[in-house]
Image: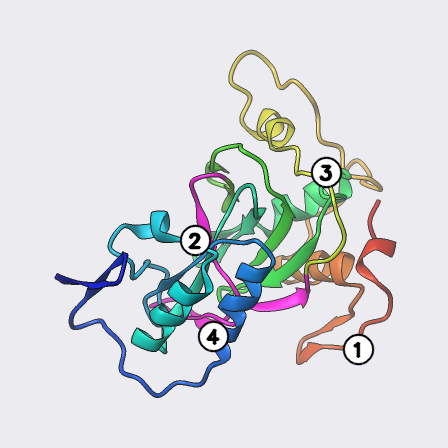
Amino acid sequence: MRFARLDDSTVAVGADATPPGRSRLMLEAALGYAEDGIPVLPAKPNAKVPLTGNGLHAATLDRSRIERWWRYWPDANLAMVTGAPGYNVLDVDVRLDGSGMETFEQLKRAGLLAGILGLARTPSGGLHAFFPGTQERCSKLSGRHIDFKAAGGYVLASPSHVVTAEYSGDYSWLFPIEGEGTPLDWPRISSIYEPTKGKRTCALVPRGTREGSSATSETGLRVSAITAFTGQSVKRSGMATPTYPLFETLP
C-alpha cells in the first residue's frame, strides 16, 4: 500500500482505489450529513474499511475536503463517526450464526428504545437505530449480535452498498432521523444482559409478555421490530405504505 497526499489529508491509494465515473449520489449524501454536523469519511467500495490513511480520525465536516475525497474515489462508501456531536447507534446484526433481532424486540417491549431518532435497514437484514450522541465509548452485548456504536466508532450510512460472502445490499432509511430524542441508556441495558457482579441489577420484562408464551420466529421478530418503529406493515415481498408515524408507536 502506498499513500498520496491530497492537500492536508493523507489518503491510502493503490489497487483498491476506485475509478472515476460514478454519479454524485454518495457525495451529495456525504455533504448533507456534514451540513447536519456529522463528521464523515470515505470507505472502500462495497466494504466498511476507511479509505483514509488515518482511519476515522480523518473524518471531517469540511466541504472542500469531502469534495476532494469523492473526486478521487467517486465509488467510495460513506461512513459517519458515531458519538457526540453526531449519533449513537444500536447496531442489530443478522448473520448465519445468529441474530440480534430477539434482543432488539425485548428492549423495545421493555420501553428502553423510546428515545430513538431514526431507523435504517442494513445489508445483512439487520437494523441501525439512531439516538442522540454521547461521550460513551463503543461496546457490545457478547453473543447477542448487538453493538453499541458511540465515541470512537463509526457506521456506514445510506446509500452505501456492501458485498460480503454472506450478504450484499444497501443501507437504506426505514425512518429518517428527526426530532430530538433521548440518549440510549446503554449502562442499564448492559446491566441487564451482562451484569459485572452478583445478580442482575435489573430485570427485563417485556410488556405484554405472558409466562409460558412460545418463542417468536426470527422472521416474526424482524417484522415486528420494523413495524413497531416505522409504523409500516412489512410483507414478505417488501414494505407496504406507511400507516402511522414512528413516534405514535413508541411506549
The CA span between labels 4 and 2 is 32 Å
Q: Position of residue 52 (x, y in %)?
A: 29, 58
The CA span between labels 1 and 2 is 32 Å
- Color encoding of the figure: rainbow
Left of 180 or right of it: where is 138?
left
Quadrant of the image occupied by residue 75: bottom left
The CA span between labels 3 and 1 is 27 Å
Q: Position of residue 154 (x, y in %)?
A: 45, 50
Sequence-first disc among 2 and 3: 2
Which residue is under mark 3? 112
The 10 Å Cα crowd at callout 2, few under 14, some 14 to 19, many 20 or more, is few
Which residue is under mark 4? 26
Sequence-first disc among 4 and 2: 4
Q: Position of residue 132 (x, y in %)?
A: 65, 44
Callout 2 amino acid = Asp
The residue closer to the viewer here, 206 or 82, is: 82
Which residue is under mark 2? 97
Task: Tell me whether the residue at label 4 lies in contact with that at label 2, contact meaning CB atoms closer than 8 angstroms.
Answer: no
